[in-house]
Image (spheres, rainbow, N blue to C red):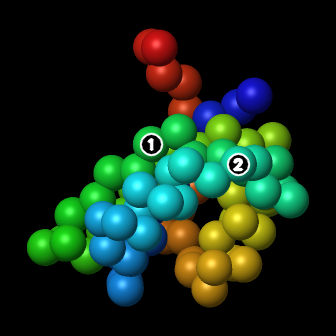
Amino acid sequence: MPKFLDVHKMGSFDEEKLKQAQGLPKDEFGVTHENIIYSKEEDKLFCLLDAPDKQAVDKHHQKLGLSCDWIMEVKTTV
């Protein structure tokens, strides 16, 4: 499964909500969270996702009312 990294505003998410999101099963778009990196001070949230394509990542965020600044396919060493 391809991996994608995206960034968007953190908004009203707190650490507990992020931990819950990370543990959710694959959604209807085929997206799961591998890791979530964030900075409250910078109001930035980075999602490392397993997803079939960029469009699925975009739809996943739109469903939550979020708009990504950017989405890119990435490779990881693990």
The mark tally for this picture is 2
Left of 20 or right of it: where is 24? Answer: right
Residue 4 makes an appearance in the image: no
Q: Mark number for residue 22?
A: none
Give the amino acid at mark 1: Asn
Give the amino acid at mark 2: Pro
Q: Which residue is mark 2?
A: 25
Dot 1: element: strand
Look at the picture and state if 11 lies above or below 3. Answer: below
Give the residue drawn at x 47%, y 14%. 78
Residue 68 makes an appearance in the image: yes
Q: Looking at the image, do the residues carrying marks 1 and 2 touch, with CB atoms under 8 Å apart?
A: no
Query: Looking at this view, is 8 or 11 the one in front?
Result: 11
Q: Earlier in the sequence, mark 1 or mark 2?
A: 2
Q: Which residue is mark 1?
A: 35
User: In the current view of this chain or complex, which residue is farthest to the top?
Assistant: 77
Rendered location of residue 63, percent (x, y): 72, 78
Left of 60 or right of it: where is 9? Answer: left
Q: CA distance from mark 1 to mark 2?
A: 13 Å
Decide: few, some or many residues near mark 2? Use Cα within 10 Å; few <14, some 14-19, many ≥20.
few
Q: Which image quarter is the N terminus in?
A: top right
Query: Residue 13 appears in which quarter of the rendering?
Result: bottom left
Give the residue drawn at x 86%, y 59%. 28
Look at the picture and state if 44 lies above or below 24. Answer: below
Query: Looking at this view, is 33 or 72 the one in front?
Result: 33
Left of 17 or right of it: where is 6? Answer: right
Rendered location of residue 2, percent (x, y): 71, 31
Query: Residue 29 appears in which quarter of the rendering?
Result: bottom right
Give the residue drawn at x 41%, y 50%. 36
